[in-house]
Image (spheres, rainbow, N blue to C red):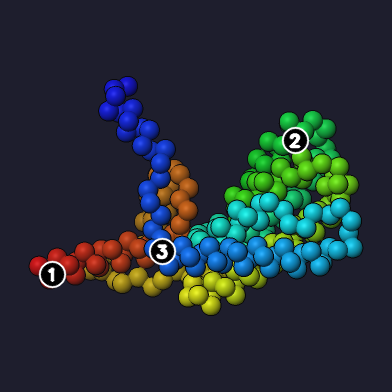
Amino acid sequence: MTYASLISWLKRFIPGPAAMGPREKIRAAFGIFCGIGVTALVSTFAVSGMAGAPLLIAPMGASAILLFAAPASPFAQPWAVIGGHMVAALVGVTIAHLVGTPMLAAPLAVALSFGVMTLFRCVHPPSGAIALIAVLGGPKVTEMGYSFALVPVLLNSVLLIASALIYNNLTGRSFPHAPAQPISPAFSLTLEDINLVLTQYGEALDISREDLEGLYQSLVAHAQTKNNNH
């Protein structure tokens, strides 16, 4: 490996700048504050009679960033969040009961959770942490058993989704996300074309096929308009 190729490879460790202006960053940050705040407050009252029960679990922080900073992501849609969290909790508790070695149970729980999430079309990356909590969360989580999937997991998830539904729509972001209607160029790209190319590409992209189609067609239309004006 040459020096130039090494530098080029190392640069790939740093992602490109997020396509977010200052106003969008402030909007997202305040949404995260509100979402986590509401979830924590309501959960505190809801589980006040359950001594030792966790009120707000850490994976909700990661979910909140997706919900408020990237509400168009397929990973941030309501079913992905609620379904993914529930799947991870149920799978994690089951593995914790069946596998007595935590260092084996932990990777099994996360891997199997992902597999089940793909079957139910509810992949949500922060859910992997919930599977780990179910296995490694300590005696109180173990004692809760499958009720852990209801409180705090389902309770936190529903409250966070409700906050995202209200806040995102009030601030001009469609949620659940509806793909923008593309500006039709002289020629169009179909979803079948996109599916074929994505299958050949071989990697998952954090954007829906409909949004990808809309972006492509709008970019082509914009380029055609610009060329016609020159």
- Name the kind of residue labelled 1 in the image: Asn
Q: Residue 221, image x and y in percent?
A: 25, 68
Task: State the residue at coordinates (60%, 59%).
Answer: 64
Question: Furthest residue to the bottom?
Answer: 170
Q: Earlier in the sequence, mark 2 or mark 1?
A: 2
Q: Helix, strand, or loop for circle 3?
A: helix
Number of numbered discs: 3
What label does residue 105 carry, if any?
2
Query: Label 3 belongs to which residue?
Result: 22
Task: State the residue at coordinates (67%, 46%).
Answer: 129
User: Separation of disc 3 and disc 1 at Cα?
Assistant: 33 Å
Q: Helix, strand, or loop for circle 2?
A: helix
Query: Is 59 rendered above or below residue 48?
Result: above
Nearer to me, 115 or 97:
97
Left or right, residue 147 beside residue 29: right
Is any atom of residue 98 visible in this view? yes
Q: Residue 61, image x and y in percent?
A: 63, 55
Quick one: label 3, few (<14), some, or many (20+) residues within 10 Å? few
Q: Earlier in the sequence, mark 3 or mark 1?
A: 3
In this rendering, the label closer to the viewer, 3 or 2:
3
Q: Earlier in the sequence, mark 3 or mark 2?
A: 3
In this rendering, the label closer to the viewer, 3 or 1:
3
What label does residue 228 carry, if any?
1
Q: Helix, strand, or loop for circle 1?
A: helix
Nearer to me, 45 or 160:
45
- Name the kind of residue labelled 3 in the image: Pro
Q: Residue 69, image x and y in percent?
A: 51, 61
Left or right, residue 86 beside residue 181: right
Q: Quadrant of residue 167?
A: bottom right
